[in-house]
Amino acid sequence: MNKKIYLSMFCVLCISILFFFTPQTVHADQISIQAKSAILMNMNTGQILFAQNPDRHIPPASLTKVLSLYIAHEAIRDGKTTPEANITVSRRAGRTGGSKMFIRQGQHVPLAELMKGMAIVSGNDASIAVAEHIGGNVNSFVKQMNQKARQLGMNSSLFKNPNGLPAKGQYTTARDVLALSQAYLRDFSDSLEMHSIIDYKYGNRTMHNHNHLIERVENVDGLKTGFIRAAGFHIIATAKRDETRLIAIVMGARSRTIRDRETARLLEEGFRLAKRDSQMKQTASNRDTLPPI
């Protein structure tokens, strides 16, 4: 047995040990995020590539709407309603403040339009209208939200409303938001078409997508932003390059600019790590095909 074969066997052994004993969380190299909490996952493998205070309780702000949208998509899938269902806007929905789709009391709006209003321009008014339609009333819908959250493994979250407006005792974590995002993209992948719309026109208004990373970062195609004063600036961002899809959650940044910058940086580091891991696995596979001794 010559030295080259011994060297090849040694390399295979080293790479195998590195691969099989890699911890579940592989911290992104030399990176720290300027936010209260963050987490990054390679959706293809389920591997957590980065985590920073992922279990810290934080008010969810408008990231809440992803859970509301999950339930709306589920109701459509299960035949309980249809995208074409015309919903009469209630007084409560019409008067809801904050980010708005600008629906008015008494209007009849298709469910599909309300869902776009929630996803693209973070309409708090649209969220109330959808909750009343699917749940019968807001309180019943919120009960569904918390039940669904538990089913999805969101064990450190409690929701008080369907839109994320400030509410005492409402909280979540970056890890829970990741679990929600993973389920949402897995179960309703077609929803990304809606989330990636840049300009949304309703009535006489043309409104811009609140997620500016869709335009600024290569291959970002979703998912949702959020802000309330008590929490800071949040985002769920997902991007796909080649066959790799990443999900990044950043919560509690001091400004929109910091949130977007740090999330873009986290995604770039995640794709670098995913490419590195893929190359390592390919090298290991190539070594395994050495001719028998």
Image (cartoon, rainbow, N blue to C red):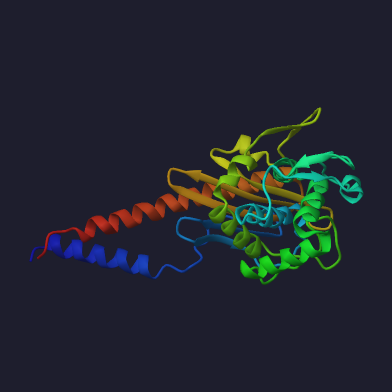
- Coordinates of residue 17 in the picture (x, y in percent): 33, 69
Residue depicted at x 79% and y 57%:
231
- Coordinates of residue 187 in the picture (x, y in percent): 55, 55
Q: Quadrant for the N terminus, please.
A: bottom left
- Coordinates of residue 226 in the picture (x, y in percent): 75, 50
Residue depicted at x 45% and y 59%:
45
Which residue is nearer to you in this view: 3 or 90? 90
Q: Quadrant for the C terminus, please.
A: bottom left
Q: Is residue 241 above or below residue 287?
A: above
On the rendered structure, is 59 left or right of 277?
right
Q: Tally the numbered discs.
A: 0
On the rendered structure, is 56 left or right of 228?
left
Q: Is residue 78 above or below residue 25?
A: above
- Coordinates of residue 83 in the picture (x, y in percent): 67, 44
> In this rendering, does residue 33 appear at all?
no
Q: Is residue 174 above or below residue 129?
A: below
> In this rendering, does residue 257 appear at all?
yes
